Image (cartoon, rainbow, N blue to C red):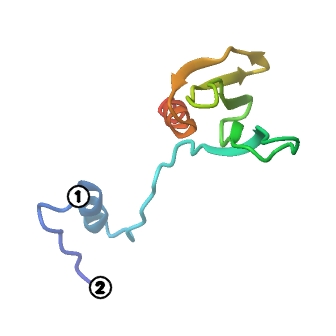
């Protein structure tokens, strides 16, 4: 039978406890909600639809019963992104003023 030696005092308490109890060290990582954006609407350049920049995204990765969209309410030369949320079938409103769609997604991610 092998002897289990305690780890150095500076070792993380979880690792020290695992070593002392003789349990194989398994790391459990708590991962919260990871949100991603998928484009659903583009502006157009000239007569061809969908040739311009992305103006709206659908947000994926939200908990069941929740939906969100991020859209650009700005003009041609200044972006102003906002977030629209739906929870349990109840629609919210377009909130926030973000310089980029990524900024809007980061703000939404912080809530989870």
Q: Secondary structure at mark 1?
A: loop
Location of mark 1 (residue): 12
Q: Is residue 7 left or right of residue 84?
A: left
Spatial CA distance of label 2 from label 1 is 26 Å
Residue 52, how many percent across, how many down?
A: 74, 44
Of the pair 35 and 27, the residue shown nearer to us: 35
Q: Of the two numbered discs 2 and 1 on the same chain, state the one appearing first in sequence.
A: 2
Residue 39's image quarter? top right
Q: Is residue 86 left or right of residue 22?
A: right
- Neighbor class of circle 1 (other Cα within 10 Å; few <14, some 14-19, many 20+) is few
In the rendered view, would you say 111 is above or below 47? Answer: above
Residue 101, how many percent across, how many down?
A: 57, 37
Of the pair 14 and 57, the residue shown nearer to us: 57
In the rendered view, would you say 78 is above or below 13? Answer: above
Residue 58 in view in this figure: no
Q: Residue at x 63, y 26 (%)?
A: 75
- Residue 1 is labelled as 2
Q: Is residue 48 left or right of residue 91?
A: right
């Amino acid at each position: 039978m092998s002897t289990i030696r305690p780890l150095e005092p500076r070792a993380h308490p979880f690792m020290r406890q695992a070593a002392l109890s003789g349990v194989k060290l398994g790391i459990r990582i708590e991962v919260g909600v990871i949100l991603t954006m998928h484009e659903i609407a583009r502006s157009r350049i000239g007569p061809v639809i969908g040739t311009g920049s992305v103006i709206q995204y659908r947000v994926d990765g939200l908990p069941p019963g929740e939906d969100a969209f991020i859209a650009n309410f700005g003009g041609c030369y200044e972006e102003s992104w906002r977030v629209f949320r739906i929870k349990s079938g109840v629609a919210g409103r377009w909130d926030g003023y973000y310089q980029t769609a990524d900024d809007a997604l980061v703000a939404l991610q912080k809530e989870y």
